[in-house]
Image (tube, rainbow, N blue to C red):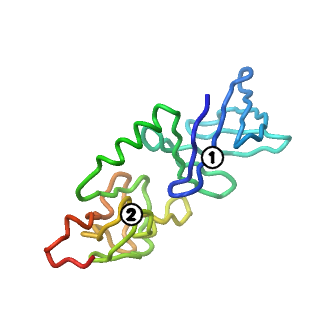
């Protein structure tokens, strides 16, 4: 099975995954192939052996195609699409309109507000920094627009699903005096 995998706002890679036998997989990333042994050691924890090196990996599913992956102290926010999902996502992105609510994907502590209410932001630009699992994560705007509201304060602890901020597209701000 082939997927297009990318870190949110980052480079996209083609990944092939084929199970060879129980717990043994052939993984191809942009044409380079490795063989891995995988064992589940907890609900979301996996032990992976590749070329004699062992890695503990924590995988937290974030919706239908999103995953937070913690490996070697690095937290990655990944999205994976097969061909059908990729076409559907491209179609859906074009339909999204109006203010966009950004919620916490996991519990954490707000470390810094980078773009307060009234700040014009670009798609993928950081709005705030959220510390989760001892890692600082930049929470980015999903669209070009203006930060309409920041619902949290620096130092505040938030639960998964808590509203962090709202970004309004530029057309929604036209003529209302909001900075753009």
Pointer 2 or 1: first along the chain: 1
Q: Is residue 143 above or below residue 126?
A: above
Looking at the rendered image, the disc whose residue lies closer to the viewer, 2 or 1, is: 1
Give the spatial CA distance, label 2 vs label 1: 23 Å
Residue bearing the label numbered 2: 141
The picture places residue 93, in percent across and down from the top left corner, at 36, 47
**In this orientation, which residue lies closer to the viewer: 70 or 45?**
70
**In this orientation, which residue lies closer to the viewer: 95 or 28?**
95
Element at badge 2? loop
The picture places residue 38, in percent across and down from the top left corner, at 71, 33
Residue at x 48% of width, y 66% of height: 138
How many numbered discs? 2
Place residue 115 in its image quadrant.
bottom left
The picture places residue 155, in percent across and down from the top left corner, at 40, 73
Residue at x 29% of width, y 64% of height: 167
Residue bearing the label numbered 1: 13
Horizontal side, residue 39 vs residue 99: left or right? right
Element at badge 1? strand
The picture places residue 165, in percent across and down from the top left corner, at 31, 64
């Amino acid at each position: 099975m082939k997927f297009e995998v990318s870190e949110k706002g980052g480079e996209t890679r083609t990944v092939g995954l084929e199970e060879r036998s129980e717990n043994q997989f052939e993984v191809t990333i942009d044409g380079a192939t490795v063989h891995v042994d995988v064992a589940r050691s907890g609900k979301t924890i996996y032990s992976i052996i590749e070329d004699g090196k062992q890695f503990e990996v924590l995988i937290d599913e974030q919706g239908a195609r999103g995953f937070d992956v913690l490996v070697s102290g690095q937290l990655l926010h990944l999205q994976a699409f097969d061909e059908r999902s990729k076409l559907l996502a491209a179609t859906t992105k074009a339909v999204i309109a109006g203010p966009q609510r950004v919620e916490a994907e996991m519990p954490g502590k707000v470390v810094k507000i980078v773009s307060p209410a009234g700040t014009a932001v670009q798609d993928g630009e950081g709005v705030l920094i959220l510390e989760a699992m001892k890692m600082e994560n930049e929470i980015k705007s999903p669209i070009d627009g203006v930060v309409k509201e920041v619902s949290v304060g620096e130092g505040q602890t938030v639960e998964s699903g808590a509203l962090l901020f709202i970004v309004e597209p530029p057309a929604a701000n036209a003529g209302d005096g909001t900075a753009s």
